[in-house]
Image (cartoon, helix red, strand yellow):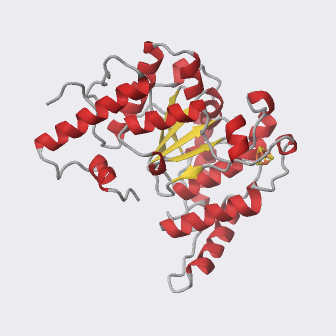
Amino acid sequence: MFDCIGARDAYDDRGMDRNGISKHRKSLSVRAERAFGLESAVTISGQKPGLSASSPAAKTEAATALAREAATPALALNTVAPARVVARQVVVNLSEQSPLVPACALPLGFDAVPFAAPILPADEKRIVLQQLDATEVKACPKCRLCETRTNTVFGEGDVDAKIFFIGEGPGESEDLSGRPFVGRAGQLLTKMIEAMGLRREQVFIANIVKCRPPGNREPAPDEVAACTPYLLRQLEVVRPKVIVTLGKPSTQYMLRSKEAMGKMRGRWHEWRGIKLMPTYHPSYVLRSYTAEVRRTVWNDLQMVLSELGLPLPKRGEQ
Ligand code: SF4
């Protein structure tokens, strides 16, 4: 999962002595300042945020029915069979459980029901995601964005990632390279991740649409509806502990909300049993490069660190 020594330290500092923890936090603090250009890395209070996810009564009945359906395990893993055979079976079973139907056709309340399928071992996750990309996304013709793309941008990262970042859609650099978040905004996202004490390869990064909307416009609702079943499959396979939505389109899609970013960010929501933290998109941070915006994003990310039990960078701690 997080297999380098630094990452293990980041996720579990109980084995470190007091000086070790202090040095680690101080180095995170320096990285935070470099990433955000803040004079001082402001830390959130020690209060652990509670979930404020709304569960509209209208969703309850549908959610209960779905939960009943979900009681039957979907994946029958055969531990004796070769990994590729198992993975093919997993693909078939995942497809049966989560068909790639337009997101708009999913039943009301599906996003309140936790995934029923068991979490796959990492090697099987990798194969399932590679097959999804190779056999479905790369040649996808499901919306008009296929006509103008250079490459599809599936997403990348650790298949066992605890944090799953969701952006809006590929930009020019991403369209040319086939990789998510590699332009200026992507470079800032990478700095933000490093400021959290992680490496980019330790998280998963994807978008709500896999092809570039021309002129970097927001993806249209029918494009989002056509494409998001791929994202839902990625989330089902990776099964992160925390989702961080970057910007309004991905936040509004995941939360089925029309609220402004200012009202949604900075507090916990829940999506299929997974905690979700909205924050501003790095491209917005670049456009509005004020200390206040940078501090706001950093506070959101510190809430994610706190939720995952990761050390919070503190300036000046000895
Ligand atoms: S944006 Fe998504 S649905 Fe549309 S063509 Fe690309 S991969 Fe297919």
Identify the residue at image location x=24%, y=25%: 315
**Quadrant of the rendered structure where residue 303 is?**
top left
Identify the residue at image location x=69%, y=51%: 230
Q: Residue furthest bottom?
A: 80
User: Where is 211 relative to 157, above or below?
Assistant: above
- Residue 3 in view of the camera: yes
Which quadrant, please, contains the C terminus? top left
Q: Is residue 289 left or right of residue 314?
A: right
Foreground residue among 31 and 281: 31
Counting from the top left corner in percent of width and height, residue 95 is at 69, 64
User: Where is 34 relative to 306, above or below?
Assistant: above
Counting from the top left corner in percent of width and height, residue 40 is at 31, 19
Q: How many marks?
A: 0
Counting from the top left corner in percent of width and height, residue 162 is at 43, 49
Which quadrant, please, contains the N terminus? bottom left
Q: Is residue 59 left or right of residue 158?
A: right
Foreground residue among 274 and 280: 280
**Quadrant of the rendered structure where residue 214 is?**
top right
User: Where is 316 relative to 22, above or below?
Assistant: above
**Quadrant of the rendered structure where residue 137 is?**
bottom right
Identify the residue at image location x=76%, y=55%: 138
Counting from the top left corner in percent of width and height, residue 13 is at 22, 48
- Residue 56 in view of the camera: no
Foreground residue among 268 and 65: 268
